[in-house]
Amino acid sequence: MTPRAKTPTSRPEPTLRTPAVRLALLLIPLFVAGCSTSPSPPSPDASPQDFPEVGPATGSLIVAGGGQLGPEIWARFLELAGGHQARIVVIPTADASDEFPENWAGILPLLEAGAAQVTILHTRDPSVADSPIFTAPLESATGVWIPGGRQWRLVDAYLDTRTHRELRALLERGGVVGGTSAGASIQGSYLVRGDPETNQVLMAPGYEEGFGFLSGTAVDQHLLARGRENDLWELLDREPQLLGIGVDEGTALVVQGDRAEVIGTSQVLIYDSATPLRQALSLRAGSVFDLGERRSLASTVAPEDAGRETLP
């Protein structure tokens, strides 16, 4: 697969930059001091591959499509982060607000799932994001969650900074990075809908580079809920080497190595320019897909559900 040329790093300033804001708020202490907080090892059938082509070599990703996420998604994220003893960092920068109080709604599902320690980390200033003081909570984190909003804000604040590198380091030590909506798209190597002016533009010069946790991919979200099921073909016409991943609301991919498992209530669509007739592969909960070999591996979907309607 031919690697895509690196997107220029200079980016236009979309809005008046606000002063740097950093909020690292420890919400709830660990219930038991001195307990081990290492992430739980994945089960044998979900072990990362030795030499993945797309996903991380170690650690896990949760790529969620926005909307209302069910308890099974939050539970899986927390499990991969180390259970009730996990150290979670939430990065809400995609959101338009700069105020994230301790009862901010974005962290409530994590608390309800049983997270005992949650830190909110936020800035708009890349020089702050590049500082060791700001990134200190990431050095001991076992999981990071990136909520939705607009993905260009994540690019402006964090791309190629120390924060970005610490997220990679978290994966390298076996942690989990998860995100929904904008927090899902930013995990791909090619960033879709990065235009600061509108989310209707798929390819925005200056905002086409994501965090690259999923190599050679572009991730779209709110797929069926917003009628976006055909949009990624436009990108693949220009960048045919990419693997397109479209995730609908209430649904997520759990990625370890090149193994991607679907959980949630709707569908994930896979777009491959080599597919005849430009037909996307539809995957439902229980489906497992090899991102490197670009083929289905298995499915735990019950036979009575196998005939449910899926979209091409």
Image: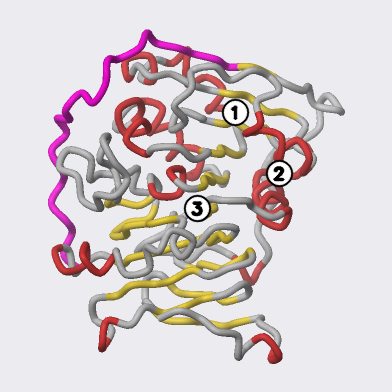
Q: How far from the left and from the top, in percent, is residue 223?
A: 44, 61
Does the residue at mark 2 contact the one at mark 1 (Cβ under 8 Å)? no
Disc 3 to disc 2, C-alpha distance: 15 Å
Residue type at the position of mark 2: Gly
Judging from the image, what secondary structure is the residue with disc 3 in?
A: loop
Relative vertical location of residue 259 with respect to residue 309 in this rendering, above or below: above
Q: Name which quarter of the figure residue 227 lies in.
A: bottom left
Query: Considering the image in quadrants, where does the C terminus appear?
Result: bottom left
What residue is drawn where x is 32% and y is 70%?
A: 230
Specify start and end residues of the magenta stretch as a single range: 1-24
Q: Which residue is mark 2?
A: 82
Q: Name which quarter of the figure residue 100 lies in.
A: top right
Q: Which residue is mark 1?
A: 140
Relative vertical location of residue 48 with respect to residue 121 in this rendering, above or below: below
Judging depth in this view, the residue of 172 and 80 nearest the camera is 80
Judging from the image, what secondary structure is the residue with disc 2 in?
A: loop
- Which residue is outermost to the right? 32
Does the residue at mark 3 contact the one at mark 1 (Cβ under 8 Å)? no
Q: Which residue is mark 3?
A: 58
Query: Considering the image in quadrants, where does the N terminus appear?
Result: bottom left
Q: Is residue 7 magenta?
A: yes
